[in-house]
Each structure stands twice: as C-alpha cells, then as structure tokens.
Image: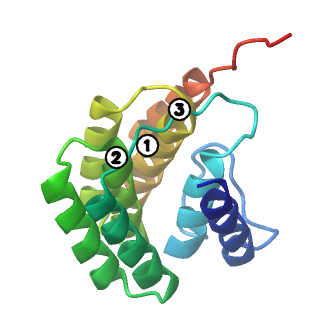
Amino acid sequence: MTRLVLAFVFIGLMLSGCGASSGGSAGTHHLSPNEMLAQVRAAGVTGVELDVQPLRDPQVEDLRAAATQAENGRDYVGANRALAQALQLMPNDPDLLQWQAEIALVTRGWAQAEQFATQSYAKGPKLGGLCRRNWTTIRFAREAHGDAAGAAQAQQHVPACAVTPPVRM
C-alpha cells in the first residue's frame, strides 16, 4: 500500500511540474486536470499520520488493481468501470468513492467529482489524508465551476483534517 501511495505521489509530481501553484483558491484555469489530480493525491500524503487500513475483500482488491492498471494507461473509462464494480461490492467504501471523484476530476466531470468526494467525506473518517483529498477535490471542482467562494470554503476545511499519531515511547 505504501508503495502505491508513493507511486501516485511521484507520478503526480511528474505530471504537475515544479511551477504549479497549490495554495488558496486563485483558480484552476492554469492547472490541467492531471495537475489537479496530482495535487489531490499529494494532499493525502504527509508521512506523519496514523493510517489504519481495514482488511479488504480479495475481489475488490482485484478490481482496485484493474483500476490502477487502467488509470496508469490513461484509460479513465476502464478505471471508472472497475471502480463502479468495486463499489457494487462495497458501496460505502470512502476510498473507492474518492478514487471515483479523482477519475471524474481528471476527466473534467466537475459535478461528479464534487458529488463523489462529498459522499466519500460523509462515509469516511473525516480526518487524515482521505479527508484532505476529499476537500481538495471539492475545491478544484468548485473552482472549475467558477464558485470561488465555495472553493475557498472547501480549502478552509483542509487544515482541520490533520491528525497526529499517538506518541510512542
């Protein structure tokens, strides 16, 4: 799982380039959907948080692998199809919902991106990397719709997602 997250961050950084802005809600007209996706995924990784992952259904894992392979090949229709099948098996999985939101974001499905990210947030832990990815996706979707106030409001939720792991001695 850690390798997958690191691969997404690396790919995201490669796609986003060094000059992409990540602050505020100044607008996304200068960011490509792939740059938005890279920033959403980077928002989910800090390396200092406690991250508890549930046991996963092997059938869902196969569909996740198919979605990863399709996305890596820029087959977003195939990735979305695999995620939709996984969601039939696990309809309340916040990770799958957020992933669908990210696919919608990269394919410029702004309303769907916001809808899936909102559902993911509602069903998820409301803390940590997933929470930051939810709100960053919502921010980009709102900016793309020209809703600067809504985007700024979404951005204000991101810092509240931080959670520090327990101190271990």
- Horizontal arrangement in the rendering, residue 74 relative to residue 167 (left or right): left
Residue visible at 37% across and 77% down? 66
Residue sitting nearer the eye, 105 or 71: 71
Q: Which residue is mark 2?
A: 117
Kind of residue at disc 3: Val
Q: Which mark is residue 5?
A: none
Residue visible at 57% across and 39% down? 129
- Asked if the residues shown at circle 2 and circle 1 are in contact, with their CB atoms under 8 angstroms apart, the answer is yes
Q: Position of residue 113 (x, y in %)?
A: 32, 57
* Circle nearer the N terminus (3, 1): 3
Kind of residue at disc 1: Asn
Q: Position of residue 102 (x, y in %)?
A: 41, 61
Q: Quadrant of residue 82?
A: bottom left
* Nearest-to-viewer mark from 3 and 2: 3
- The answer to whether residue 22 is seen in the rendering is yes
Residue visible at 33% across and 54% down? 96
Q: Which residue is mark 1?
A: 134
* Circle nearer the N terminus (3, 2): 3
Q: Which residue is mark 3?
A: 52
Q: Name the image quarter holding the C terminus.
A: top right
- Horizontal arrangement in the rendering, residue 28 relative to residue 111 (left or right): right
- The answer to whether residue 148 is seen in the rendering is no
Residue sitting nearer the eye, 36 or 76: 76
Q: Secondary structure at mark 2?
A: helix
Please say if 38 is above or below 124. below
Kind of residue at disc 2: Ala
Q: CA distance from mark 2 to mark 1?
A: 5 Å
